[in-house]
């Protein structure tokens, strides 16, 4: 199949009568797994680039978080069993005659990140790390390169697999609202805004015509809520804050209704209050896997096309599921910057396609724009985008 660039038009998800958007917050186990895998890949890639002059072969997209166990109630929190981080995938463990301390690197990344995003999670006591990566391959030098000549992608970059990915730009009002609500509470770079709250936040927005109903579930630290009155007082304050965020973000574009902690109406007595002492549902056995949460956009948009490719943790040099996630979003951004038209971009690549010539690149325009002009934008963006630099700069790190 030769490389093809095609363009079509159809309504935006914002024009449909129904739009549903979900976000698993920064402290959700699946989001944590994605973030840890991607941060480890970025750290490993930077180390290799600085030390050896190239990113060595690796894929860390098989990371798993196994939940621990806690005793929790109003005014009560005790961690009984630790969380286990299982780091899977494959990784180059040497270059020439030089060994790579990948295990120490990965542990430093994990403990540092969890300390930042889950400040109430005592990783020193409550985190076990198991290293399950391998350096096995049918090609003996694949994960043990003798020199840069053993990295074929440096001279002949090709797609590592047959894949299909999608991305879009810009977000719809419902998507922007979903992101804004969770990000107001979880400020990823500097930690959460309010230590009385947990970071395992879920946001679900359902837009019917020009009205959006949003459900937000926010945990409260049990020691900050020794009784029901205090718990509900904290939630009233959070509700008022989120109302202000929603009004500012939508700016009249949509009517909205915000519901907080709908689970508090559960008839089962034990589920009346959403309490988390560590900040994440990992504390009572929930689990996290790479690729089960948000797309690289930070959202789970039900009415947009979605690939099952997990970009997080993959090699940023030539792993197709990651490389084309970067290219697809960059194309959508370039189309919007040049024309003002929103679009959704789909890229399908066959195994061993030249990396910048995927078999299919299709742009679905959500507006009236000249198709020939868009084809040129696609071609130029595929040629010019430095996917390695963008990935190593953290473009795909969940935030």
Image (spheres, rainbow, N blue to C red):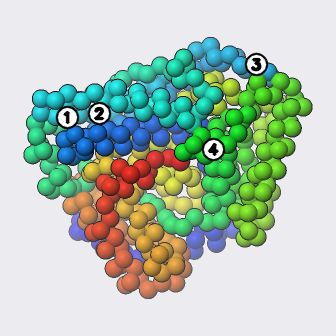
Q: Earlier in the sequence, mark 2 or mark 4?
A: 2
Asked if marks 2 and 4 touch (Cβ < 8 Å), the reply is: no
Task: Report the mark closest to the observer, 3 or 1.
Answer: 3
> Residue 156 location, x and y as percent?
15, 56
Helix, strand or loop at disc 2?
A: strand
How many residues crowd mark 1 within 10 Å: few (<14), some (14–19), many (20+)? many
**On the image, numbered disc 4 is attached to which residue?**
186
Q: Which of marks 3 and 1 is nearer the N terminus?
A: 3
- Towards the viewer: 349 or 199: 199
Task: Report the mark closest to the observer, 1 or 4.
Answer: 4
How many residues crowd mark 4 within 10 Å: few (<14), some (14–19), many (20+)? many
Question: Which residue shows up at 77% across the image and 41% down it?
Answer: 261
Which disc, if any, is residue 90?
Answer: 2
Q: Earlier in the sequence, mark 1 or mark 2?
A: 2
- Residue 114 in view in this figure: yes
Q: Which residue lies furthest to the right in this view?
A: 229
Helix, strand or loop at disc 1?
A: loop
Q: In this view, does 113 lie to the left or right of 119?
A: left
- Towards the viewer: 175 or 74: 74
Please tell me in which quadrant of the rendered image residue 377 appears. Answer: bottom left
């Amino acid at each position: 199949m030769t490389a093809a660039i095609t363009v079509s038009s159809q309504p935006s998800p914002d024009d449909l009568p129904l739009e549903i958007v979900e976000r698993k917050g920064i402290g959700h186990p699946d989001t944590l797994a994605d973030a840890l895998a991607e941060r480890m890949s970025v750290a490993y890639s930077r180390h290799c680039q600085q030390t050896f002059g190239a990113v060595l072969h690796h894929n860390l997209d098989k990371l798993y978080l196994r939940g621990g166990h806690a005793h929790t109630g109003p005014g009560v929190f005790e961690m009984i069993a630790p969380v286990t981080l299982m780091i899977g995938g494959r990784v180059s463990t040497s270059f020439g005659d030089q060994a790579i301390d990948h295990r120490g690197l990965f542990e430093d990344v994990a403990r540092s990140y969890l300390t930042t995003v889950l400040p109430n999670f005592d990783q020193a006591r409550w985190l076990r790390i198991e290293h399950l990566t391998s350096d096995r391959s049918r090609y003996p030098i694949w994960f043990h390169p003798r020199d840069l000549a053993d990295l074929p992608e440096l001279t002949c970059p090709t797609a590592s697999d047959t894949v299909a990915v999608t991305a879009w730009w810009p977000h719809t009002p419902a998507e922007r609202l979903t992101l804004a609500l969770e990000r107001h509470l979880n400020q990823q770079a500097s930690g959460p805004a309010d230590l009385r709250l947990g970071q395992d936040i879920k946001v679900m927005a359902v837009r019917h015509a020009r009205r959006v109903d949003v459900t937000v579930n926010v945990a409260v630290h049990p020691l900050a809520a020794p009784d029901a009155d205090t718990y509900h007082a904290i939630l009233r304050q959070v509700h008022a804050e989120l109302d202000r965020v929603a009004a500012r973000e939508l700016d009249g574009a949509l009517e909205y209704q915000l519901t907080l902690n709908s689970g508090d109406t559960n008839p089962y007595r034990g589920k009346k209050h959403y309490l988390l002492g560590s900040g994440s549902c990992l504390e009572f056995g929930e689990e996290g896997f790479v690729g089960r949460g948000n797309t690289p956009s930070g959202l789970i948009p039900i009415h947009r096309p979605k690939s099952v490719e997990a970009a997080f943790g993959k090699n940023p040099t030539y792993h197709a599921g990651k490389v084309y996630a970067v290219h697809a979003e960059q194309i959508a951004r370039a189309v919007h910057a040049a024309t003002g038209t929103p679009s959704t971009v789909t890229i399908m690549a066959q195994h061993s396609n030249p990396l910048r010539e995927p078999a299919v690149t299709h742009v679905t325009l959500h507006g009236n724009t000249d198709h020939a002009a868009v084809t040129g934008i696609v071609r130029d963006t595929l040629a010019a985008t430095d996917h390695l630099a963008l990935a190593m700069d953290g473009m795909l790190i969940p935030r």
